[in-house]
Image (cartoon, rainbow, N blue to C red):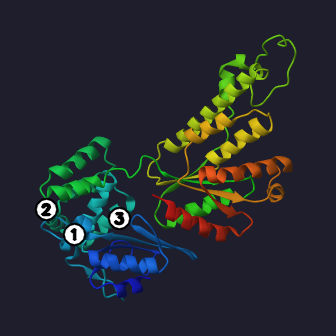
């Protein structure tokens, strides 16, 4: 892989991360012409792009190439060629080179702004290694930083690196403000600071839906491992139907019989309060309550504060909740929930990439016996209705898990934003 890339470029390309052949990824910085040449080669070689990372699946494991262009470093007067000053050769390659210690610091400084003043263990290790190679690297980097508008970013990196603990929020905010105040081209400094803005307010959502025993959990685990190999942080989350039992506990009157038959014992309904069982309006109103509770619950899971996770992978999500609403209230209790169904479709969070792992009710029952074959058959029909509603990708849950995992990885990588 690295050899092929070395052959297609016409000038120096910096290997920012681990040097080949170590690892299964390359982190490269190239000038615009070489960036275009590498991009074309990666596309032709079957790599799939997401943001600055190209990934190829279908091999044992996954191979990733993170590719950046010096275009985003350029200023009106300078083309960022100073980043390629004093590179070190990498054995076996003509054009792939190791950046100088000063360039390592500049690259790390830009990443520190992107992470809003936080420094990772990997970055700290690279900075330490650069300073071991050249103890005067800070001075050289500061000289080159002026032309690139990187003075403030470099100051923030140095402060974060030398601190005994992570910088507090106030210090990080002050450091980001200094990015604009330091000398250098204003446009370049503004572009650097723009890198600190979040790309999105929530993680990307991937969901797996289907019958119990269809293989959802296996696909969640495989996708997490695949993303980890590509350097994308993710978190797995389970989401089930909320029956509003807490609300019933808070308002016990809901489970007291009303009307003429209030002295006649009634069987307890797990999902509909006793006080509402005899009223069509009451039953419909309760389903609206359950819809609202579940929509809020799902959004809370989506928006809950998570440090660093770019992708949130759900084992069950909005499509599964919709199936349970239909199963319990429409199919089992014969309540017409067409308006509640529309409301849940409107209010519930949608997956960025969603999958329906399909197996027959007989296969699902042979794997897990938590529901009757009849219930599983009904749920299987209801899941088919969710494919168009939530734009789900169909997966044959009887196929080998590894083969499905490759399809999932490609679809996720193409669908992420």
Residue tagged by mark 1? 102
Residue 39, quarter of picture:
bottom left
Residue tagged by mark 2? 146
Q: How many marks?
A: 3
Inspect this view and state whether residue 372 appears: no
Q: Residue at x 24, y 70 (%)?
A: 103
- What is the crowding at mark 1: few (fewer than 14 residues within 10 Å), some, or many (at least 20)? many
Q: Measured from the top left, where is residue 217 in percent x and y? A: 66, 56
Q: Residue at x 47, y 51 (%)?
A: 203
Q: Measured from the top left, where is residue 194 in percent x and y? A: 28, 53
Residue tagged by mark 3? 125
Closest to the camera, between mark 3 and mark 1, is 1
Closest to the camera, between mark 2 and mark 3, is 2
Closest to the camera, between mark 1 and mark 2, is 2
* Contact between labelled residues 1 and 3, with CB atoms less than 8 Å apart: no
Is 333 rendered above or below residue 181? Answer: above
Dot 3 or dot 1, earlier in sequence: 1
Label 1 residue SS? helix
- What is the crowding at mark 2: few (fewer than 14 residues within 10 Å), some, or many (at least 20)? some
Is 219 rendered above or below residue 171? Answer: below
Closer-to-camera residue (253/114) = 253
């Amino acid at each position: 892989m690295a050899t092929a890339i070395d052959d297609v470029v016409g000038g120096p390309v910096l290997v920012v991360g681990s040097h080949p052949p170590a690892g299964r990824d390359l982190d490269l910085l190239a000038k615009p012409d070489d960036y275009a040449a590498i991009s074309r080669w990666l596309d032709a070689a079957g790599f799939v792009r997401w943001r600055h990372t190209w990934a190829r699946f279908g091999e044992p494991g996954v191979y990733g190439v993170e590719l950046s262009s010096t275009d985003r470093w350029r200023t009106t007067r300078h083309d960022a060629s100073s980043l390629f000053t004093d590179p070190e050769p990498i054995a076996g390659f003509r054009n792939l080179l190791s950046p100088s210690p000063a360039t390592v610091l500049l690259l790390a400084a830009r990443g520190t702004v992107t992470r809003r003043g936080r420094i990772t263990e990997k970055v700290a290790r690279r900075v330490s290694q650069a300073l071991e190679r050249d103890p005067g690297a800070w001075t050289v980097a500061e000289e080159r930083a002026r032309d690139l508008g990187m003075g403030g970013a470099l100051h923030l990196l140095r402060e974060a690196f030398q601190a005994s603990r992570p910088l507090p929020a106030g210090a990080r905010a002050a450091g980001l403000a200094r990015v604009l105040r330091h000398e250098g081209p204003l446009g370049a400094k503004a572009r650097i600071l723009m890198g600190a803005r979040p790309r999105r307010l929530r993680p990307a959502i991937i969901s797996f839906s289907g019958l119990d025993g269809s293989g959802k959990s296996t696909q969640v685990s495989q996708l997490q491992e695949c993303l980890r190999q590509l350097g994308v942080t993710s978190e797995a989350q389970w989401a089930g139907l909320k029956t509003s039992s807490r609300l019933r506990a808070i308002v016990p009157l809901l489970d007291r019989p009303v009307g003429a038959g209030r002295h006649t014992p009634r069987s307890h309904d797990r999902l509909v309060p006793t006080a509402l069982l005899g009223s069509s309006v009451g039953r419909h109103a309760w389903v609206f309550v359950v819809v609202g509770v579940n929509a809020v619950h799902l959004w809370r899971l989506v928006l809950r504060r998570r440090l660093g996770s770019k992708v949130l992978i759900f084992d069950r999500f909005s499509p599964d909740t919709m199936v349970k609403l239909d199963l319990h209230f429409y199919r089992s209790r014969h309540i017409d929930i067409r308006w509640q169904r529309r409301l849940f479709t409107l209010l519930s969070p949608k997956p960025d990439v969603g999958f329906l792992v399909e197996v027959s009710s007989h296969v699902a029952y042979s794997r897990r016996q938590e529901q009757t074959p009849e219930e599983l058959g009904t749920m299987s029909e209801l899941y088919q209705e969710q494919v168009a509603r939530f734009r789900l990708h169909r997966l044959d849950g009887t196929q080998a898990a590894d083969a499905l995992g490759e399809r999932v990885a490609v679809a996720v990588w193409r669908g992420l934003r």
